[in-house]
Image (tube, grey):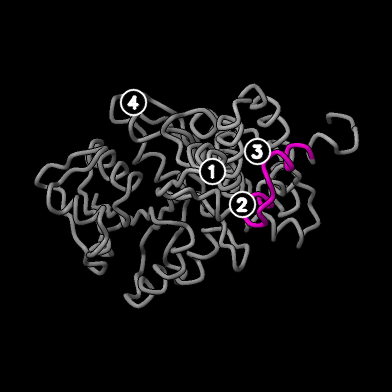
Amino acid sequence: MNISIIGTGRWGSFIAWYIKRIGHNITICGEENAPDFIELRDTRSNSVVSFPEDVEITSNLERALKSEIIIISVPSQALRSLMSRIKEASPRDKTFVLCMKGIEISTGKRLSEICEEFLNESCKVAVWIGPGHPQEFVKGVPNCMVIDSRDQKTKEMLVDEFSSDLIRFYYGCDLIGNEIGAAAKNVIGIAAGMLDGLGISSLKGALMSRATREVARLIAALGGQENSAYGLCHLGDYEATVFSRFSHNRMFGEMYVKGEKYDKLAEGYYTAAAIENLCKKYKVEMPICHEIYSVLYENKSVKEAIDALFSRKIKSEF
């Protein structure tokens, strides 16, 4: 099967490596002037993977859209712009798979909703989410992930095509919950990094427990299933996000409280703003996410944020 990956960052290049590993023909497409694309085009490798000569590396979007399956791995806030370009090519009978996690700040829309805005009914949309880091996968460390879609046949086809000894896939059964849970865990990753930076990492257990409860409330308010927050999209992804040295969001949070600059993409920064908007719209109480938003966007000190959480009214755990 011919499969294209749009996005030449850490995750996109790994996905291309993985899909090639399990026997498919691969085209990987990036922005012509982007540093990560230039490195991949000129050296056929980056800090994570190396590609054989039969992997096509291109900046021609129309060429990439000729494949049967198009996997997208770009920053979440850039998806709308990309989809407007994709629409110009009028793709038909394609399957689009989103391998990023986020919520559009300006609209509060999930990424699959944005994608569907620009595609006709002959195209199907799915999401690929769950724990794991490229640096570990390429060393042969296995993990479990989820594929979800509003279309059952698409979901089954993708799980069948993509499953291997390296990644065990599960069928998702709640597209809303899986997308929201996956996006929200990046905000919690930033919170965890802040705790690390302050030297109070022992609070991570409470962070994970209480954060999962509030994310479950948001999922339910949006029409999803609360239990999704306890699955691979959110709680199941905490080790990779809350503890791992490879987590961009955790590292961003740690360096933030230390007053150091972090120059890699931390999706949780943008998701914090999107979740704050959704909480106001749907009247959902998410104290942890709210305090992270206040720190990042309103210049509240991390100490003040922690004090605010600890001074909340005493209540039953469940």
Question: Relative to the observer, which residue lies in front, 224 or 243?
Answer: 243
Element on which disc 1 rests:
helix
Residue type at numbered disc 2 = Leu
Q: Which residue has dot 2 on it?
A: 296
Q: Which callout, 3 or 2, points to the residue nearer the camera? A: 2
Q: Which residue has dot 4 on it?
A: 165
Q: Residue at x 84, y 29 (%)?
A: 317
Q: Are marks 1 and 2 in contact (CB under 8 Å)?
A: yes
First in sequence: mark 4 or mark 2? 4
Instruction: Give me the C-alpha separation between circle 3 and circle 1.
Output: 27 Å
Element on which disc 3 rests:
helix
Residue type at numbered disc 4 = Asp
Q: Quadrant of residue 86?
A: bottom left
**Would you call the spot at circle 3 few (<14 residues within 10 Å), some (14-19), or many (20 or more)?**
many
Placement of 260 over or under 240, stated as above or below: below
First in sequence: mark 1 or mark 2? 1
* Magenta range: 293-307
Instruction: Tell me the quarter of the image containing the C terminus.
Output: top right
Q: Which residue has dot 3 on it?
A: 229
Q: Quadrant of residue 141?
A: top left
Q: Which callout, 4 or 3, points to the residue nearer the camera? A: 3
Q: Residue at x 36, y 62 (%)?
A: 94
Q: Are marks 3 and 2 in contact (CB under 8 Å)?
A: no
In the image: residue 202, left or right of residue 268: right
Question: Relative to the observer, which residue lies in front, 310 or 265?
Answer: 310
Q: Are marks 4 and 3 in contact (CB under 8 Å)?
A: no
